[in-house]
Image (cartoon, coloured by chain):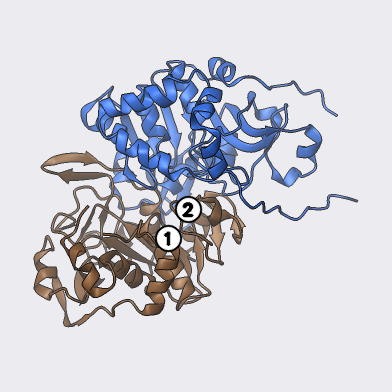
Chain colours: A blue, B brown
Amino acid sequence: MTNAANKLVTLAAAIDAHVPSGSMVILGAQLEQMIPFAVAHEIIRQGRRNLTLVGPISDALFDQMIGAGSVERVMAAWVGNASEGLGHCFRRAVENGRPNPVATVDYTNFTLALALHAAAMGAPFMPTHSAHGSEILKRNGNLREFASPVNEEKLIAVRALKPDVAIIHAQRADRFGNTHLWGNLGVAVDGARASRKIIVTAEEIVEPEVIASDPNRTLIPGFMVSAVVHEPWGAHPSPVQGHYGRDHAFFADYHARSRTLDGFQAWLAEWVTGPASRAEYRAKLGEARCELLAVKTHAFSAAADFGY
Amino acid sequence: MPTETKSETPARGYSTGEMMVVAAAREIRDEELVFVGMRLPMLAFAVAKRTHAPRAIALFENGVIREAPAAQMLYTMGDPANLQGATLCGTMLDVMGLLQQGRVHVAFLGAAEVDRFGNLNTTWGRRDGKDVRLPGSGGACDLACLAQRTVILIPHERSRLAERVAFLTSPGFGTGGDWRRTHGLPANSGPSAIVTTKGVLRFGADGEAFLATVHPGVSVEDALDSTGWTLRTAAKIDETLPPSAEELTAIRALDPKGFWTAA
């Protein structure tokens, strides 16, 4: 059916090939759902440095990468822990330069979404009424006031933001990178299309016919994808609709232990640099815990008929 | 952050957090489009749905639109229970587009600081004389700019209700008067209430907040003394109507352990 290349690789190979130090990377584009923790941990293990992280909110993932010393700049609307509060590593880095100073370019969720949308559209900027009067507008050079050319309104131009690589965790993809996503999408679609490269990690790798059976759900076309990785439980402790729920206790434990730098480093050694791979991480998590988080009652959508 | 009112809880039969959630829920009118933020607002929306506003519709910044309340308590808006049975699961721009059109009636926001004109700070706070980097705007600035009404939930302490925010993340009425209009913000938008641990503040035509009600058991003096500026008061300050049995039942059905409402 296709002459496309098989893009299925290991997580380690994908990061090695496509995420060099200094890259601008978008992660966590679906907000609290389907956060690519497996990828972030591999980036940390491979010792990447000086990354620019892009994302609306990050629910502890940015905090971990900052604490591990992988990051020099964050372009985001919110960095913390969605159910617990502040990001301790983020605070240490921004307030005291530990383990290294991190620069922040503050956005709002809407303006970050528009920055990615502009890039996905091939436009230099998108106009908005949001952020008027905010200190964020004054400090973020990618937000500029201008007079509307079509009426008397004062608008803000949100400059297009084009990351080097988008990391998207999905329910399923085929080996060519055609990707089915469902649930809340956040900025995942624009984030992927705005980026120069896309890495997809998926709970399941399925035959191309499965993806082709429902093209409305194919939100990332394979020809744009650089690498596909089969990574079950790759978003834990964040949820993946139809696969597992959010491990609230894991977020709470991380929040408590990352309060001090020593505590964070012990956590990092235990869960990130200790396990050699995601498989070891999952083994450490244990069957009982996974069982608890796994879907209890399936809720399948009705089939859509593409017949003619 | 602990509040001194916590110890009064057993005698009253409800916590301060529950009083705040109920007061916030009452800001929602039936059939309204409600932009629901993280934490306490998720519970406030669920309570409104189960009591006086059964046809209210929730928008979440992750792209979810929901008419039926979620079956379980939510820790985050991305919890699977908030997606299953949603009216629509889409993108952030789907919901932000509705917001920018002016269709969103009311939005809920928390903050580290709020000032006399309802401006919010969630970017740089102060604790023990040191600057503290807070998580940032998230969608708060967008909602504060573009929703018809915003309702702010915050603990009532002098350090939180400040004369002037240290960092203006999300605009209220700026410096008052026609500040919003001159800055390009839409007409028919801006803060409408601040729900605190001690009472409810509303806003005058000039954009300055005043004390409208105090919660049961809180004195007006206590509320005024706990505010970082000389707070105006309504001509007559009523007591906030305490939570009804129906409202408490709705809260406790969703949050039986008080994860969001213990304080």
Q: Residue at x 78, y 38 (%)?
A: A210
Give the amino acid type for the residue marked by disc 2 in the picture: Met
Label 2, residues with CA under 10 Å away: few <14, some 14-19, many ≥20: many
- The residue drawn where x is 23% and y is 47% is B167
Residue on which disc 1 sits? B42
Q: Quadrant of residue A123?
A: top right
Say which chain tag 2 marks: B
What residue lies at 53% left-to-right and 35% top-to-bottom?
A: A235
Q: Which mark is residue B77?
A: 2
Location of residue A290 in the rendering, given as x and y in whole percent from the top left corner: 55, 38
Give the farthest residue toward the bottom: B236
**Type of the residue with mark 1:** Met
Mark 1 vs 2: CB contact within 8 A: yes
Q: Foreground: B83 or B182?
A: B83
Precedes in sequence: disc 1 or disc 2? 1
* Left or right placement of residue A166 versus residue B162 in this view: right
In-front residue for pair A26/A174:
A174
Residue A9, label in figure? none
Q: Decide: is A96 above or below B46.
A: above
Give SS at disc 2.
loop
Residue B239: x percent and y percent? 22, 80
**Res. B220 image quadrant:** bottom left
Q: Position of residue B199 (x, y in %)?
A: 22, 71
